[in-house]
Amino acid sequence: MLIRINFLILFLLFSQSVFSIDKKIFTGNPKVDLFNESMTFQSESVLNSDSQENQITQKKSPFIAGGMSLLVPGAGEIYAGSYIKAGLFLAVEAGAWVFYFKYLKKGDDQTNFFQNFADGRTDLRPTWDTNEPERYRTRWDVIRYYEWSYANKSIINPQGDFSDISNAIINNDITLPPWERIDWESLNALERAIGKWYSHTLHHYGEQQYYELIGKYPQYNQGWFDADSYNFTYGDQLTATFKEYSKMRGLANDYYYKAKTAATVALVNHVISAFDAYFTVLSYNRKIKLEANYKEQPTIFGNIPITYGTIKLEF
């Protein structure tokens, strides 16, 4: 729909110092005639009888708008004059990052919690390890895991070749933490030689995968301090601590997943805002067109210069 609004502005030129006097015309209006005695129109020098059109269109760049919103969602909408949408994109951006940092911190705190739980010292011994000498023990103990695996290697895999397997305990100082007394290469070699349901090799202490594996696969069940079955096999009842630890780790992963989702929302918000700003400016440039038309209008007093102001709005 095209709406055309024409504004008719009559320019009455009063001063002889501006225009040279070609002829004098009295309007018949006492206020005008008494004020300046007569009106003078210059109909041939400044304006001619043909219409003179000066189009004034304030166009904006859709690429600038898109780039602005790609950097800061809503900025391009402000540039385009769409303030409500700008506010919505900015609100989504702010909310997404608040959500992200909130759950990222929750994930980090929960990760520290379950890692410290696994590394925490304990004096309790599993029922199958009651003869173990007094030493530095932790809730999940790599020495306990290694010694149980080594003792049961032929039961787990009777066809396994263990001829080249060397002792993984490299330090007999029982006051040291378990992870400082183990040679990881020898431990991993044992895990590979056992095979069967020993489907993974333990990552070095402190790595993210170290803490994930010990609470994810039954292979690592016998490393927990409350393991109570010497002849444990894959599929047997897991210890209560194994299950509790798995829940702790799962909660941390849930927090990180929520943080990742919030970051994804923020990224998508940038892209959507950029596209929206681009097309909003295109729409803006199509909808508004301002024109000024100048011409002389014949009247009983002669040709009078007039201006038509035209605003076109397209919907």
Image: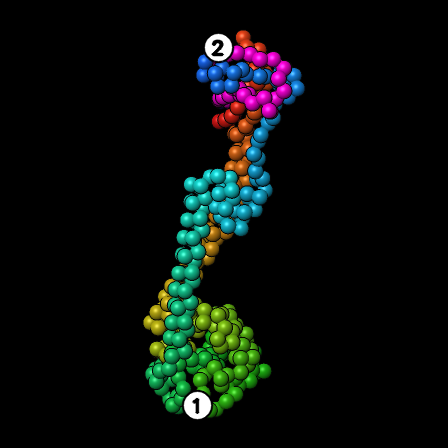
- Magenta: main secondary structure equals loop
| Residue 309, horizontal then vertical, whole percent | 53, 23
| Residue 262, horizontal then vertical, whole percent | 44, 54
Magenta span contains residue 111: no
Magenta residues span: 2-29
**Going 45% across and 80% down the picture, which residue do you hit?**
142
Query: Residue 10 has which mark?
Result: none
Most distant residue in the top direction = 300
Q: Quadrant of residue 121?
A: bottom left
Scheme by which the image is coloured: rainbow
- For the image, the number of numbered tags is 2
**What is the distance, in whole Å, between disc 2 and disc 1 at their CAs?**
120 Å
**Going 58% across and 39% down the picture, which residue do you hit?**
61
Task: Determine if residue 112 is in view.
Answer: yes
| Residue 20, horizontal then vertical, whole percent | 63, 20
Is 56 located above or below residue 208 in the figure?
above
| Residue 182, horizontal then vertical, whole percent | 50, 83
Specify which label sits upstream in the sequence, 2 or 1. 2
Label 1 SS: loop
Q: Quadrant of residue 85?
A: top left
The residue labelled by disc 1 is 174
Task: Determine if residue 233 is in view.
Answer: no
Magenta span contains residue 26: yes
**Going 45% across and 16% down the picture, which residue do you hit?**
31
Is 77 located above or below residue 56 in the figure?
below
Q: Neighbour class for label 1 at 10 Å: few (<14), some, many (≥20)? A: few
Is 16 located above or below residue 220 in the figure?
above
The residue labelled by disc 2 is 28
Kind of residue at disc 2: Gly
